[in-house]
Amino acid sequence: MSSIELRHVKKSYEGKPPVIPDLSLEIPDGSFTVLVGPSGCGKSTTLRMIAGLEDVTAGDILIDGARVNEVSPSERDIAMVFQNYALYPTMSVQENIEFGLINMKVPAPERKRRIDEISHIVGLEGYLKRKPSQLSGGQRQRVALARAMVKKPKVFLMDEPLSNLDAKLRTQMRTELIALHQRLGTTFVYVTHDQTEAMSMATKIVLMRDGVVQQDASPEEIYAHPTNRFAAQFIGTPAMNIFPTEGLSLPEPPKDAALVGFRPSRALLATSGAGSRDCFTFAATVRIHEVMGSEIIYQAEAPFGVVSFKTFNQPLVEVGTKVTLSVDRGSLHFFDAQERRVAA
Amino acid sequence: MEASTALAGNPAKDRQHEGAKRILRMLRPYILVGPSAIVLIVFWIVPIFQMGGLSLFDWNLVNPHRTFVGLKNFAGLIQDTQFHQTLANTLIYMLFTVGLSVSLGMLVALHLKEATRRNRFLQAVVFSPYVISLASVSLLWLWIMNKDYGLLNQILAVFGISAIDWLGDPRYALGSLIAISVWKSIGYDALILTSALQSVPQDLYEAAELDHAGRWSTFRKITLPMVSPTLFFIVIVEVIASLKVFETIQIMTQGGPQNATNTLVFSLYQYAFQFYKVGYAAAIGMVLLVLVAVFAVLYFKLLEKRVHYR
């Protein structure tokens, strides 16, 4: 188990503006920390710097309090699962898992014991003699995990490991990764651009944009109290509705509020036509609906713009229907002109 | 009325049209393969059979009469000690040329695989001998290896080493020809291997680094298997090229001194066009054919399990 700390880390490539201008971050021991953000935000670069696969331009990286800037990747006691798994195509599953142990000069009986144990955990017992090309995407994913696990590292680094799987398998593997983290209790650092993955697996989310941390908090905190407009709209599906406050009859908006936002799940269909004084109530016309099962996602046209809202276990509202939507005062998020959160 | 007839069509004409289409469909594969098959038969298969036939005759190339001698030419080869040396020369030439050019080509490729401007320039330099004609190469090296005024001996003289007769001494002549062949083909091998090395996914090396693999282990377990299809291709090309070696020997040594640089193809040429023993030359040709076939089968059998095709 291990904690990781990044102190004023900078990363730039020759002749280009810095990818990461100044990043400071603490990844607690035993946490499942997810670095999330849009493409090109520097999350994978950050992970690769922790792994030692990328040099740090300035600043320090510490693992368990020890500076590791000059320590080679193999000496950092970490394991990494790559986006496309990076399995050795010429080796069998067993050889893939065993390669690191052989290089670490682990005795043969111990290697066999560990491979048996790990292949049982990830369900690969019957596939040890196969080549990666003979495996499905999910099985390759398991081999990559097994290869990382068998070394018993202090830190697991994962670079979008589920992005090549189909939706169903991705959901299944998410659950398995959560269970694996709970079982091992090791520090996991996971990179993804998918906020659903981040929300469902993380004990801590680091939301990044243009190499800058936008918010660093638990999934609950980041969802309930986003620090800025970007965080508010990146986390949550569909994205938070955000509109200028000007011209809206809002219940007691804060003085500096320039923008108001609310989650689609917090906009409720008002039955009596008008909401209470503590609600932001408005009329809208349904334009699109997406039936997801127990929930239905709507897009409706309000006087101030297009609004998303959700209903749960309620009858379908047909396209063209005029509805009244109501958002509780406590569910409104306010942002100033610089798009920073304003206390409600 | 006319419109309805046009729509219904003419059933007899339709059947005829369908029949023509079916015949065309049946003939299409033969039409497509035909030209290549004809070229292959006329220029490859027929000459091989002709050569096989000639090896059973005694013929001097000029006299229209050929004497059937059965396997006498082959029996002659078995007893011919000069032919034994020629065969040994060919195999030694092949082994060293292929071994050295492929392994040195790999070394060069490993050093030049980063796509930098400097490496691209060095690649061009290393590749340049490959584009020079064999006749020019031979003349160039005749000068470099000349005992009296050659560049090589002049350099050795600086270090106090006495002049060596690179092409005139039986101890050095074959080695000298091997060196020239390696010098010429190293750039080609390096170029092909460089592109193969560049196509190995970088994340495999990163994974190996995290797996505590050293440089040798990474090369043996990751690089070599990943470039094995290319390596296989190069080895096949080099083996065939080295078994066919002729020009450098013709220009530089004429198979001498004391038969030290004579090879199968040059020997075949000598028997056919200098000694006018066409049957004997054809028998040598058959030995060469069998040799190439054996190597081809051997490579495919031995390497198919070791070659990783992505």
Image (spheres, coloured by chain):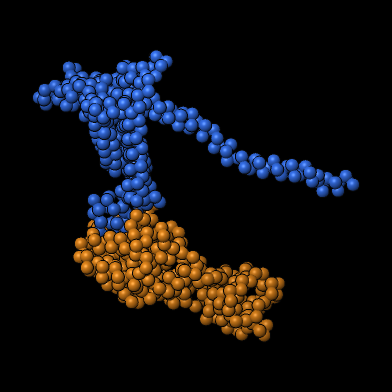
Chain colours: A orange, B blue
- Expressed as whole percent of the image width and height from the top left, the position of residue B281 reads 33, 24
Q: In front: B188, or A222?
A: B188
Q: In the image, is residue A160 above or below residue B93?
A: below
Q: In front: A65, or A212?
A: A65
Q: Quadrant of residue B106?
A: top left
Task: Residue lying at the far left in this picture: please name it.
Answer: B160
- Name the residue located 29 percent from the left edge and 56 percent from the top edge: B208
- Name the residue located 83 percent from the left edge and 45 percent from the top edge: B6
Task: Residue lying at the far top in this picture: please name it.
Answer: B63
Q: Quadrant of residue B19?
A: top right
- Name the residue located 88 percent from the left edge and 44 percent from the top edge: B2
Q: Quadrant of residue B109?
A: top left
Q: Is residue A295 left or right of residue B258?
A: right
- Expressed as whole percent of the image width and height from the top left, the position of residue B54 reads 39, 25
Q: In front: B280, or A164?
A: B280
Q: Is residue B156 left or right of residue B34?
A: left
Task: Residue lying at the far right in this picture: please name it.
Answer: B1
- Name the residue located 47 percent from the left edge and 69 percent from the top edge: A169
Q: Quadrant of the N terminus of chain A?
A: bottom left
Q: In the image, is residue A297 above or below residue B25?
A: below
- Expressed as whole percent of the image width and height from the top left, the position of residue B136 reads 32, 21
Q: Is residue A326 visible?
A: no
Q: Is residue B187 left or right of residue B162?
A: right
Q: Is residue B220 visible?
A: yes
Q: In the image, is residue A63 above or below residue B183?
A: below
Q: How many marks?
A: 0
- Expressed as whole percent of the image width and height from the top left, the position of residue A217 reads 39, 73
